[in-house]
Amino acid sequence: MRRRQQADCSSNNSDESGIESCFDSENEESDPDTNPTDVDTDVEGDNGANISWLLDEDKDHPPEYYLNQEDEFDESEYMDEDYSDNSCLLLDFIEKRFSQYCKYTHKDPERTMRDISLCVINTFFDWLLNQCRGKGGRRVCGVQLANTLGTYWKVFRLVYERATGEKIRGEINQKIHRILSKLVKKHKLTKGKWEKTAMYVEDLVEYLQTNLTTTKKRYTHGRHRIQLVLFCQLAGFSGNRLQALLNL
């Protein structure tokens, strides 16, 4: 393979002044071949300027076409935000929990959300952190991390914006951090993230071998067992890239 030839440094120095002169307007000379009539003089002039070229049917639609578009434009189609599936699940979860709280305290959810205040937010999250029962009455561990509470607050702001069409007032955003800090201390939430247990290659081999040979676990189709083996091996290679496997 041929190697790229190095440029001559001496030629760069000699051409530098020439390159800069390309942008020097003081030494610019007019082109003798330029026709003065090429300049559009209809932009500025009398009110009787010829605009027939704007109505050329081959190039554009008539003015009524665009006026009808303005009249028929529906702004509601562009008011809703586009969220991912996981974000929609969180939004629906917080909205459902808020409705449950209002039902428990005998309040109207829509009116309470519209007249939101610091005391309502504080009481709602305090109630939420005390919940130990999930869907179907199952016992759940509840919120254990302070980061989860912070995420719930961010989602709650989106729920409020989706319900009312407005953002939460600035004074609430300024004071909410103190409320969240007190809730973290009151419920003894852990700061930081859960440390995930590492899975070694030997553990993965044993897991895959058990999955292929066991008769206790049944699949709706035999290929699902093989697919699981493939995905587990791909996850071993892409473990440090969380979205790599999901984007396949």
Image (tube, rainbow, N blue to C red):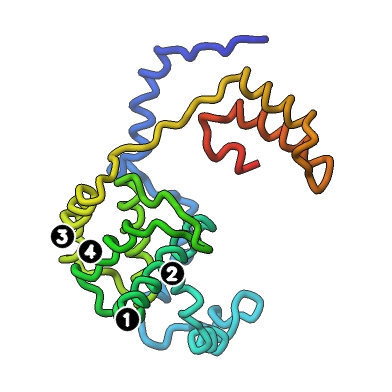
Q: Residue at x 31, y 40 (%)?
A: 24
Among numbered discs 3 and 4, the one appearing first in the sequence: 4
Q: Amino acid at mark 4?
A: Asn
Q: Amino acid at mark 2?
A: Lys
* Circle 1 residues within 10 Å: few <14, some 14–19, many ≥20: few
Which sits in the foreground, 221 or 217? 217
- Give the labeled residue for mark 3: 175
Q: Amino acid at mark 3?
A: Lys
- Give the labeled residue for mark 2: 96
Picture coordinates of residue 244 (x, y %)?
Answer: 58, 37
Total marks shown come to 4
Q: Residue at x 25, y 79 (%)?
A: 115
Left/right placement of residue 237 relative to residue 159 reads: right
The answer to whether marks 1 and 3 mark residues whose Cβ atoms lie closer than 8 Å is: no
* Circle 2 residues within 10 Å: few <14, some 14–19, many ≥20: few
- Give the labeled residue for mark 4: 122
Q: Describe the element under mark 4 as helix, strand or loop.
A: helix
Q: Of discs 3 and 4, which sits in the foreground?
A: 4
Q: Of discs 1 and 3, which sits in the foreground?
A: 1
Among numbered discs 4 and 1, the one appearing first in the sequence: 1
Q: Which mark is residue 106?
A: 1
Picture coordinates of residue 58 (x, y %)?
Answer: 66, 77
Distance (Cα) linking label 2 and label 3:
25 Å
